[in-house]
Each structure stands twice: as structure tokens, then as C-alpha cells.
Image (spheres, rainbow, N blue to C red):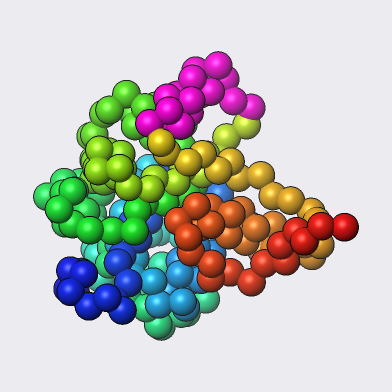
Amino acid sequence: MNTSNSNPQQKLPLILGITGASGLIYAVRAIKFLLEADYPIELVASKSTYMVWQAENNIRMPADPAAQEKFWREQAGGVTTGTLTCHPWQDVGANIASGSFRTLGMLILPCSMSTVAKLANGLSSDLLERAADVQLKEGRKLVIVPRETPFSLIHLRNLTALAEANAAIVPAIPAWYHKPKTIEDLVDFVVARALDILDIDCIPLRRWSGH
């Protein structure tokens, strides 16, 4: 896919990082709405994500990029629209590892505390961490959705370090004023608020409009 900005109508891709934190439904819902809204996605799942899928859903996530694209589309309800490119976690030579590859920014959800710690200390041991580090150094938007509770002092200090580096921290904390009726309603609220940081409004959401 040509991701240059020669066509002003062409959307730049969004990098979606998925880590081994519990709550992979957040990633699935984000993929569904982004693809339906025709936002190109460059997806990289960490090594631990494979183990979490197996533990939480008893489903094996394929490593082959083409098979993984099919896997994520199936998990997202069989969505066939949009462009989804999956990258192996160890491929540090991929396009998203370079600052010269233009993007809308990067969303990491759910984000484990291990990933938070590495990013806060400038460590890049795989493609996901390198892509996130690139967003910070290029001054692009990096949105982190930590899924952990309770936070230890170390967690809070690492999150503070990332916030000081201009990353946006959006904890996976739903609201109730939009009258949620399903688990998906609660999940979609968090995903929508995370995408708000990236100026992406593609999820039907009853927003607060005052009394």
C-alpha cells in the first residue's frame, strides 16, 4: 500500500499495538470500527499476546501475517472492509519501525505494565516497542490504554514518565452515563475515548451533553 501523502484524500495509517494484557476484546472492537470506517491499520501483536489469547479464549492466534489478518477480521465479526496489515512481533525492520513512515500515530490497547515499563525507559526489544518509541521521538501521538489494577507505585511512575514524554494515558475505565446495556457498550466507550485522542470519531457513542 502506498502510504505517501501525495493524495490529500488518502488516510494515513494508524499503528495498533496489542500486548499480552488481559482484555483483548478492546483490540477486537477497535479493529472492527476502524476497518468499517476505512482507516488503514498497521497491526503488531506482542509475543505474549499469543499466550493470552490461548489462556483467555482457548483460541490459537496464527503467526503468519496473512493468516493473522484473517484471524483478526474473524474476531471482529467478519468485517471485510478496510486495509489491515499484520506484522510479526520480531520484525524490527518493518515499515513502522522507521520515523520516515508517516502515520496518524499509535494506539496500544490493551497495554501491559511490562510494555509500559520498557517504553518509559526507552527500551525497544521488539517491533511494538520500537514503533512506540518512534512515535515519541517523532512527536506523534501515542495513546496507551493500560489494563491493570491496582497500580503499584512503580506502575504509576512509569505511566507518569510516559505522560511527561507526551504520550496520552487512557486507562480502561468505562463510564455509565451513556446507559450501557452490554459488555461491548462498556468496551466501546473506552475505545472511543482512546480514539478521540487521535481525532478519530468512528464509534457510535452517546456523549455527555450536559444536564
Say whether residue 162 is magenta: yes
The total of numbered circles placed on residues is: 0
Q: Nearer the viewer, residue 44 or 178?
A: 178
Up-down relation of residue 80 to residue 95 (above or below): below
Quadrant location of the N terminus in the rendered image: bottom left
Instruction: Give me the residue at 58% from left, 69% from top.
Output: 203
Q: Can residue 44 be seen in this view?
A: yes
Expressed as whole percent of the image width and height from the top left, the position of residue 153 reads 55, 16
Residue 5 found in image quarter: bottom left
Q: Residue extending furthest bottom?
A: 80
Up-down relation of residue 123 to residue 39 (above or below): above
Q: Can residue 43 be seen in this view?
A: no
Expressed as whole percent of the image width and height from the top left, the position of residue 104 reads 34, 58
Q: Residue extending furthest right?
A: 211
Magenta extent = 150-165
Instruction: Give me the residue at 30% from left, 66% from top.
Output: 12
Residue 7 found in image quarter: bottom left
Q: Which of 168 and 116 is in front in this view?
A: 168
Q: Nearer the viewer, residue 94 or 105?
A: 105
